[in-house]
Amino acid sequence: MGSLGCCWESAGKTSGVYDQKFPEKVVVEWLDKSENRIYYGEVAIDKAGYKLAKNLPNFSYYTGEVEDEIFPYLIIGMGETGEIKVWISNTPSAGFTGRVLHELGSGQAQWRENN
């Protein structure tokens, strides 16, 4: 798909992909400035994610409006000690009524010093 950049205090970078097969893995690399480490790793994605993506439920906005055109979101999280998690959701972020979040895979990154 490509690469995304983000900032250390917030999340929210998104990239759209269509007309592609469901991914089999996620490869990530990030810099932990506090430890001066570069973490890198990959996570295999559960093949059941494809079925989940096709059957995600509707959700509601805070206004009560129901969204019935659902686009699946792969959400990737990296922890401070190198944990990697991959989820699929029917919304891009928290704060929606009816949001679902299914874990598709997890792993542990390796690290090297940032020279």
Image (cartoon, grey):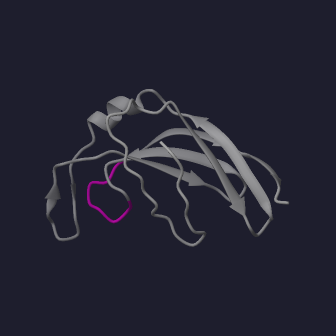
Look at the picture and state if 71 lies above or below 12.
above
Look at the picture and state if 39 lies above or below 6.
above
In the rendered image, the quadrant that contains the C terminus is bottom right
State the image coordinates of residue 89 (x, y, percent, origin top left). Answer: 37, 48
Q: Residue at x 29, y 62 (%)?
A: 96
Name the side, left or right, on which 71 lies relative to 50: left
Residue sticking out furthest to the top: 47
Look at the picture and state if 77 lies above or below 88.
below
State the residue in front, 29 or 108.
29
Q: Main secondary structure of the magenta part?
A: loop
State the residue in front, 28 or 107.
28
Name the side, left or right, on which 70 lies relative to 45: left
State the image coordinates of residue 71 (x, y, percent, origin top left). Answer: 28, 46
Q: Residue at x 47, y 42 (%)?
A: 1
Q: Is residue 108 visible?
A: no
Q: How many marks?
A: 0
Q: Residue at x 50, y 65 (%)?
A: 11
Residue 44 placement: quadrant: top right
Let me know if residue 98 is in the magenta part: yes
Name the side, left or right, on which 98 lies relative to 108: left
Let me know if residue 46 is in the magenta part: no
Q: Residue at x 37, y 33 (%)?
A: 20
Q: Is residue 88 visible?
A: yes
Name the side, left or right, on which 115 lies relative to 15: right
Residue sticking out furthest to the front: 2
The stretch of residues the image draws in magenta is 93-100
State the image coordinates of residue 6 (x, y, percent, origin top left). Answer: 55, 64
